[in-house]
């Protein structure tokens, strides 16, 4: 479920946060569903429970999860904020990508038609 | 909590430990790293009260360790060169440690022996090096002590066992606030389990920090600027190193990701990329600042 890449140079707790955010946005983790207890996740991933505690605390601060005393941590229902944040970061990446494309001499129309193609093929296939 | 204050140790004219001060909080996993001969094992021996520091103090929860059995009952030390009684078996060890440690958990010992597929009636001297290490680890976690000191314990273990031992440690940290202190020269080995790192070098402690803070507080930036820039243009941020290869600049700087990114953006770079550092790279940068020739440290 949650994957940690040991070759990834980012801190493990950052990877955990991103992984849980990602699953929330994709709807794999449904609102009000329970997260794995710290201890269990630590055993499963063979990592330090303090690291997981820290990741959960950060997620709670961001409002992505909420904790119920004595019962554990749950995904919060409000994922709109998370979506908005994710949108911003995707647009940032797009900005860099467009700069790259422009530097490589790709024309605006060509780029746009590729985008269009993606949405037509990928989305069309799903709907 | 373990408190070491200004400890110094000489072996004849060798200065093994030089004025080391460090605090290890309970419930954290402390990684002690350093090159061969940096003083890791000496430090652990002093922590376990086997040898006495020439000067300075080591205390566990405020009590001096040396010659103090009450304190010694609270930790288990897995030495690098393990000693077992002649002709002993794991079963005999179980009885021995059961007498030494009041809270020794026989059930857990049996369960782990079975789990690791070790025969408790076989003589330990017929075991391989890795199997001996496994027996030591099982004894250590079955003793249910508050602290476990591991001297290069993970080195002889195969990957499967290593993961298993890490999981056991993780469980005990979560359940009962175990504090493992793990000495190793293998940085990668420590990256996933430790949350606090102390770097020993030539007998002195260079830094002792939270691992995540360490990683988030230092970044490498690769960038190309329209007009050539030099280190002096970035006086407002703390630059650890500034290298130039053609038009490509590689900057290692202290600071959070966002602030560094906006700082670089202000210079209108043609291209830039922010990269996190691995533990190894952090140590190269941190110690270069201290004036140490660290390249030898990284294996």
Image (cartoon, coloured by chain):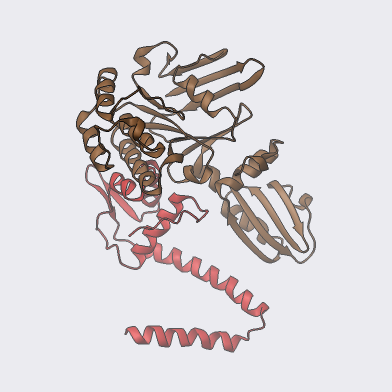
Chain coloured red: A
Q: Residue at x 63, y 40 (%)?
A: B297
Q: Position of residue A22 (x, y in %)?
A: 39, 63
Q: In which quarter of the view is residue B130 placed?
A: top left
Residue B49 vertical placement versus B143 (above, below):
above
Residue B48 vertical placement versus A3 (above, below):
above
Q: Position of residue A121 (x, y in %)?
A: 41, 87
- Number of marks: 0
Q: Position of residue B3 (x, y in %)?
A: 48, 21
Which image quarter holds the C terminus of chain B?
A: top right
Q: Position of residue A77 (x, y in %)?
A: 29, 60
Pick the front one: A31 or B290: B290
Pick the front one: B283 or A73: B283
Residue B153 vertical placement versus A67 (above, below):
above
Viewer can see residue B178: no
Q: Residue furthest top?
A: B67
Position of B146 with respect to B190 (left or right) is: left
Q: Residue at x 34, y 14 (%)?
A: B70
Pick the front one: B216 or B78: B78
Chain coloured brown: B
Q: Residue at x 42, y 10 (%)?
A: B67
Viewer can see residue A42: yes
Pick the front one: B143 or B268: B143
Which image quarter holds the N terminus of chain B?
A: top left
């Amino acid at each position: 479920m949650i994957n940690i890449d040991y070759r990834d140079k980012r801190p493990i707790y950052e990877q955990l946060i991103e992984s849980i955010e990602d699953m929330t946005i994709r709807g794999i983790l449904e609102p009000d569903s329970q997260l794995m207890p710290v201890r269990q996740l630590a055993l499963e991933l063979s990592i330090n429970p303090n690291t997981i505690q820290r990741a959960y605390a950060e997620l709670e601060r961001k409002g992505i999860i909420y904790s119920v005393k004595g019962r554990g941590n749950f995904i919060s229902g409000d994922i709109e904020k998370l979506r908005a944040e994710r949108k911003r970061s995707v647009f940032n990446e797009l900005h860099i990508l467009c700069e790259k494309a422009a530097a490589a001499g790709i024309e605006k129309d060509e780029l746009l038609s590729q985008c269009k193609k993606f949405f037509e093929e990928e989305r069309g296939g799903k709907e | 909590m373990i408190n070491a204050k200004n400890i110094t140790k000489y072996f004849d004219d060798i200065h093994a430990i030089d004025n080391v001060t460090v605090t290890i909080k309970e419930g954290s996993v402390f990684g002690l790293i350093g090159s061969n001969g940096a003083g890791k094992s000496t430090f652990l021996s002093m922590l376990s009260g086997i040898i006495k520091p020439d000067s300075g103090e080591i205390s566990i929860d405020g009590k001096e360790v040396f010659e103090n059995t009450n304190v010694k009952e609270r930790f288990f030390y897995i030495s690098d060169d393990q000693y077992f009684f002649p002709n002993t078996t794991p079963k005999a060890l179980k009885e021995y440690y059961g007498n030494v440690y009041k809270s020794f958990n026989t059930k857990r010992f049996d369960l782990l022996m079975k789990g690791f597929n070790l025969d408790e009636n076989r003589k330990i001297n017929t075991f391989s090096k890795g199997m001996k290490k496994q027996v030591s680890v099982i004894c250590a976690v079955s003793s249910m002590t508050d602290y476990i000191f591991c001297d290069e314990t993970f080195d002889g273990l195969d990957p499967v066992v290593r993961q298993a031992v890490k999981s056991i440690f993780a469980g005990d940290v979560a359940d009962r606030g175990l504090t493992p202190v793990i000495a190793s020269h293998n940085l990668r080995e420590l990256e996933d389990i430790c949350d606090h790192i102390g770097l020993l070098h030539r007998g002195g402690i260079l830094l002792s920090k939270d691992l995540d803070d360490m990683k988030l507080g230092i970044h490498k930036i690769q960038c190309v600027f329209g007009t050539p820039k030099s280190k002096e243009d970035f006086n407002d941020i703390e630059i650890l190193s500034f290298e130039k290869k053609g038009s490509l600049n590689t900057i290692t700087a202290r600071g959070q990701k966002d602030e560094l990114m906006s700082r670089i953006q202000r210079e209108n770079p043609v291209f830039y990329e922010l990269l996190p550092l691995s533990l190894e790279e952090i140590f190269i940068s941190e110690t270069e600042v201290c004036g140490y020739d660290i390249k030898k440290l990284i294996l």
